[in-house]
Amino acid sequence: MALEHALLVALREQPASGLDLAKRFGRSIGFFWSATHQQIYKVLGRMETDGWVAATEVAQSGKPDKKVYDVTPAGADALATWLAEPTPTHALRSDLAVKMRGASFGDREAVLDVVRANLADHHVRLDHYRQLMKRDYPTGAGGLAGLELDQYLVLRGGILTEETWVAWLTEYLEAHA
Amino acid sequence: MALEHALLVALREQPASGLDLAKRFGRSIGFFWSATHQQIYKVLGRMETDGWVAATEVAQSGKPDKKVYDVTPAGADALATWLAEPTPTHALRSDLAVKMRGASFGDREAVLDVVRANLADHHVRLDHYRQLMKRDYPTGAGGLAGLELDQYLVLRGGILTEETWVAWLTEYLEAHA
DNA sequence: TGGTGGCTTGCAACTCGTTGCATAGGTCTG
DNA sequence: CAGACCTATGCAACGAGTTGCAAGCCACCA
C-alpha cells in the first residue's frame, strides 16, 4: 500500500497535521494522489503506533490545538526501503473507459455527455497544472536538482497525463460526431 | 463500483464463464481493467442474485462443466442506467509517481532502476497494443461504427496512455542522467 | 492404479478506502 | 447567551479488492 508512503514523502517535505495533509492532498498533491481526512487520520494513527512518525501538540490562536506529525528515523528508513522496491505497473482502472467501450449498450448521446463533462474536468486540471508550472518554474527545469527537480518532473507528468486525456476524449468525441 | 458494469459490458460483447472472463481481463481488456477470478466469481454471484445475469451449465468435452453467464434484461437496464450517469474524474494514484517525487529521501539510483523497470514494462505494453491495432484494425478507423468503433477508440486510448508513460519516464531518466 | 497437472468454481481472511456520523474547541453574530 | 459555522480529530460500518487456500472434475502417464 502506498498511502503510508505518500504521507511519509509529504511529511518529509513539510511536517503537518492530519487536516493540513488532507488539504494538501486536496490541492497540489491531490491531483496525483487523493485521500480523505478520515483515511489520513487512520493511517497516521497506525504509523504513530509503528513509530514511523511522532506527533507534537501545537496550540493555535483562535483555533483548536493540532497535532503536527514529523517523520522519525525509523519512518525515514521504512520510506527509503520502500523507495528501492520494484512497483508493479497497474492497469488504467477507468470507469470512463468502460463507459466509452460499452456506449453502444446504452444511450449513446448520454455517454457522449459524460465524456464531454470529463473532458471539461481535464481541461480545468490541465489549466491548473500549467498555472502551477508558470508560477513555480517560470524559467523551466534549468538549474533544478534534488527534491525540486523531482517535484518539477512529477508536475510535468501531470501535465502530460492531462494532455493525453484531453487528446483521447477529443478524438472519441470527433469520431462520434 | 465499476467491476460489475465492466463485467456487464464484457458479457454483452460475448457471454462467458467466470474463468473465461478472468482470462479476457488478463489479456486485451485487462490492460484497461484488471480483476482476479476470485473477485469475478464473487461479483458474478451477487449479480446473479440481483437478477442481472443468468447462468447456463455447459458441458465440455475433456474439461469440467462450466457456467456460462449472459446478461438479463434487468442487467441490460442497469448497465444502460449506469452508462448515462456522470463519472467523477479520479487522480492518478500511481505508486511510481510517489517514488519519483520522493526519490531524494532514499537511494536515488535505486529509484532510477525502479523507473527503468517500469519504463520497460510500458514499452512492452505499447508494443502489444500496437500489434493488436495492426492485427484488428489494419486499415485504421475508417468505416467503423458502433461497438467496433468504441473498441478501436479504447485501444487508441491505451496506446496514447502508454506513449505518455514512455515519454514521461524517459524525460525523468534524462533529467537525472 | 495412483500421481500429477490443468480447468473450474468457490470460500475465508485480510487490507484498503469510502461514507456517514460524532465530539470538542473556537469564532462570530443576532 | 444561543445558534451557526469553522477547525480539528476521530469512530464505526460498509464495500471493494487481494491473497491464500480448498475442492471437484477431467486427462494423461508411469
Image (cartoon, coloured by chain):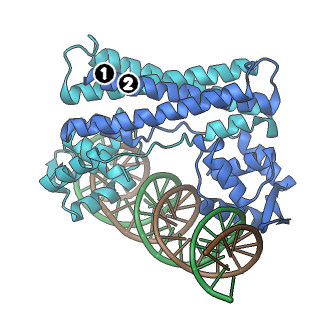
Chain colours: A cyan, B blue, C green, D brown
Instruction: Locate residue B152 relative to residue B32 in the image: left or right.
Output: right
Residue holding disc 1? B174
Give percent across and percent down for residue B17. 75, 59
Give percent across and percent down for residue A145. 19, 24
Where disc 2 sits, the SS reads helix
| Res. B104 visible in picture | yes
Q: Note whether A161 is above or below A9 in the view shown.
A: above
Q: Note whether B128 is above or below A169 in the view shown.
A: below
Where disc 1 sits, the SS reads helix
Q: Note whether B141 is above or below D1 in the view shown.
A: above
Instruction: Locate residue B164 relative to residue B156 in the image: left or right.
Output: left
Instruction: Locate residue A154 relative to residue A113 in the image: left or right.
Output: left
| Amino acid found under the numbered disc labelled 2 | Thr
Q: Which residue appears at 61% of the width and 51% of the height? A: B1
Nearest the viewer among A14 and C2 is C2
Give percent across and percent down for residue A97. 64, 36
Nearest the viewer among B59 and B90 is B59
Quadrant in the rendering for residue A32: top left
